Amino acid sequence: MKPELLVLAASPSADVMAQLAQYFECHHLWQQPREQQAAWLAGVAPNVRGVLTTGAIGIKAELLAQLPKVEIVAVNGIGTDAVDLAATRARGVVVTNTPGVLTDDVADLALTLLLAAARRLPALDTFVRNGSWEAGKPIASTRALRGKVCGIYGFGRIGQAIGDRAQAFGMTLQYFQPRAIEGTPVPRADSLLALAEASDYLVVAAPGSPATHHTVNAAVLAALGPQGTLVNIARGSLVDEDAMIAALREHTLGMAALDVFADEPRVPAALRELENVVLTPHIGSLTVETRHAMGQLVVDNLRAHFDGKPLLTPVV
Ligand code: 8YV
């Protein structure tokens, strides 16, 4: 008999979905109308042995408590901040995620956002579309990237890949994270505040956690300053969003280019109305290639678990 799986969100890869159907008896919560989900879940929950979730959805203790036979939570993403790890550990439920395979695309998006902010892409796109160019309106110059400092908050795999790309644009690097990285020539700032003071662009690439919650606060944003740009491809929880909106509105922070928000998919109107922002809907890993690779890793972890083999990418 195939192990029963509760699938909280689909993979965009048809091949991954076919493999899930081949190896597991899948119960697709995402296919159920919202108002029917609770009753539907009560029916399938008793035999669920695995859960497939995403970085953004994670899993709460309440849902785990409804699944008496659950053994594994496979996260189709790298972030585990939305997974109640205390609850999974207490139940002896193993957790896997998808590190590595999404590094390049997330780093690419960080640079895309950084460049879009630097060269004011959204505003200039509008400028062409609305006829302002044809009408002969003036176009303000932007500032070059070369020689500017790219500060990277969180210098793990993704942060370092962002650094490689920023360097290719002639930027100078610094990083901050509590634990120093050995063997890197990139200098580590003494604090996040010091990093923001030194940076023209501050890119947030640290994991979401209680320890990083709102660490990008009003003081850090003020240190980044009116010529500074904040880029966030990590988690909205790291940034004090109200303080950021106030700083952008008062131009004590120059710009923000954001793929992640405090309460996704809700983005405050006060943020959406600003002109000095570039906004994308949490798409760092959303390419055909990467979503397939992530989904494959999810399938491989689930199969390894139910075959009694070592997990490929366990969350420890
Ligand atoms: C996606 C992410 O939101 O990997 C993560 O932690 O935030 C993203 O890649 C999601 O997990 C895709 O399923």
Image (cartoon, rainbow, N blue to C red):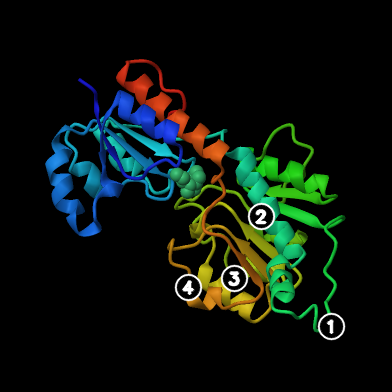
Horizontal arrangement in the rendering, residue 256 relative to residue 124 (left or right)? left
Q: Amino acid at mark 1?
A: Gly
Q: Amino acid at mark 2?
A: Val
> For the residue labelled by badge 4, is the local secondary structure a helix, a strand or a loop?
loop
Which one is in front, 95 or 38? 38
Residue 212 in picture, x, y percent from top left: 51, 53
Cα distance, mark 2 to mark 4? 21 Å
- Find disc 1 in the rendering and name its residue: 136
Q: Nearer the viewer, mark 2 or mark 4?
A: 4
- Quadrant of the frame with the C terminus: top left
Mark 1 or mark 2, which is nearer the start of the sequence?
1
Q: On screen, 236 above or below 31?
A: below
Q: Residues within 10 Å of mark 2 (few under 14, many from 20)?
A: many
- Secondary structure under tag 1 reads loop
| Label at residue 268 | 4
Mark 3 lies on residue = 218
Residue 253: percent from left, percent from top = 68, 72
Whether residue 162 is visible to the viewer of this picture, yes or no, is yes
Q: Earlier in the sequence, mark 2 or mark 4?
A: 2
Closer to viewer: mark 2 or mark 1 = 1
- Between 44 and 213, the residue placed more toward the observer is 44
- Given this view, does label 1 or label 4 mark the residue nearer the observer? 1
Q: Determine which of the numbered discs, if any, sits on residue 199 in the image.
A: none
Residue at 21%, 34% in the rendered image: 48
First in sequence: mark 3 vs mark 2: 2
**Drawn side of residue 273 relative to residue 200, left or right:** left
Query: Residue 72's image quarter?
Result: top left
| The residue at label 4 has a CB less than 8 Å from ligand 1 | no
Q: Is residue 98 visible?
A: no
Q: Identify residue for label 2.
A: 203
Quadrant where the N terminus sits is: top left
